[in-house]
Amino acid sequence: MESRSDQVRSVTRYDLAGHSQTLSLDRISDALENEDCSLIWVGLFEPDEPLLFKMQIEFNLHPLAIEDAHKAHQRSKIERYGNSLFIVINTAQIIDGAIVYGESHVFLGSNFILTIRHGGTVSFKMARERWERNPEYMAQGTGMALYTVLDQIVDNFFPIIGHHQALLDELEETILSARYQKDTIIRLYQLRSDLTKLRLAVSPLQDILSTLLEFHGERIKDEVRVYLRDVHDHVIRLNESIDTMRETISSAMTTNLSLVTVSQGDTMKRLAGWAALLAAPTLITSWYGMNFTHMPELEWQIGYPLVFGLTAALCCWLYWMLRKAGWL
């Protein structure tokens, strides 16, 4: 089990002038009551139950939301509990060519934001530093802090899309060949499976952002909505890119199977053509292999050359006909 110091990544208080101060967990509730307090930002990583209970007391959070925050693998959602919002978001990042999924929970109040990370979620330190560097962001309060978190989560999906698009481009020539290659088909199925899982992670973000844009006006100011609309547009683009790649993979696999089928059909036609070509001399030789007593042409002096010539002529005619029909 991780220590308390490993679970608590940051506890920062910001005053109205934009100055920051590191707090202890026990001083959070006192700082919230201070009129000079603009915002308190707390970042946790896979907290245990006692730590979450501490957060519940300090921020006056709903016990049902705390219960969900303690248990990862929640569905992406946004819920309102009293004066605070509770948001669950599935996250992803690419490490060594593999997608690593995580989960983030965000509690948003009038003067606080509590972020909880599970699994492979990237630290929100960059989001917090971005918020600190922009006085106009800080002036918009918790809504803009939420924007920086959501924007970082969404931006982390784009390298994954780029990586999978590069893989698809790499396989494109092999996909459209007329040969069946098992390894390529397996990689395509894996790629499509990755995109399906990624779609399940990205798709709910569109609903969450739509809800934030339509409701929760007391938390999301009009100035902040402009930024959230930009994140919403990015999520739509992600969904469209994922759907396009999935459709491309499905079409390519169908095309590959069709090309393989046509190629196999051509092979069967050639085999059938050669079988028909060989059937004529086989029939003639088997005919004269019968043990009849009276076969007059066997006594002819020109019998053998005549049969040989007719057989050769018949084979040439069959070859010309089959070649003309495209079977040879």
Image (cartoon, helix red, strand yellow):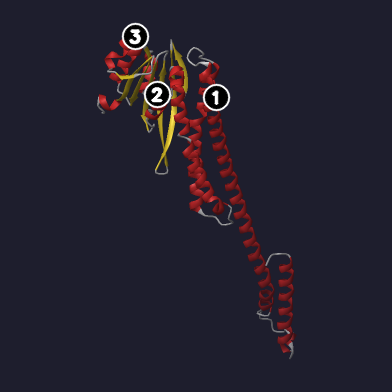
Q: Earlier in the sequence, mark 1 or mark 3?
A: 3
Q: Earlier in the sequence, mark 2 or mark 3?
A: 3
Name the mark on residue 299: none
Q: Amino acid at mark 3?
A: Asn
- State the image quarter where residue 60 is shown: top left
Q: Dot 1: few (<14), some (14–19), or many (≥20) neighbours within 10 Å?
A: some
Q: Which residue is mark 1?
A: 229
- State the image quarter where residue 51 is shown: top left
Instruction: Name which residue lies at 70% across and 64% down.
Output: 326
| Percent x, y of residue 52 | 32, 19
Question: The residue tagged with tag 2: helix, strand or loop?
Answer: helix
Q: Which residue is mark 2?
A: 132
Asked if the residue under mark 2 is in contact with the one under mark 1, i.e. CB atoms within 8 Å, the reply is: no
Q: Which is more toward the observer, 169 or 231?
A: 231
Measure how far apart labels 1 and 3 are at the Cα level.
33 Å
Q: Which residue is mark 3?
A: 34
| Percent x, y of residue 257 | 59, 51
Question: The residue tagged with tag 3: helix, strand or loop?
Answer: loop
Nearer the observer, disc 1 or disc 3?
3
Measure how far apart labels 2 and 3 are at the Cα level.
20 Å
Q: Earlier in the sequence, mark 1 or mark 2?
A: 2
Q: How many marks?
A: 3
- State the image quarter where residue 317 is shown: bottom right
Nearer the observer, disc 1 or disc 2?
2
Q: Amino acid at mark 2?
A: Glu
The image shows residue 271, relative to residue 227, as above or below, that is below
Classify residue 175 as left or right of residue 11: right
Asked if the residue under mark 3 is in contact with the one under mark 2, i.e. CB atoms within 8 Å, the reply is: no
Instruction: Name which residue lies at 53% across and 31% down.
Output: 234
Instruction: Name which residue lies at 50% across and 41% down.
Output: 162
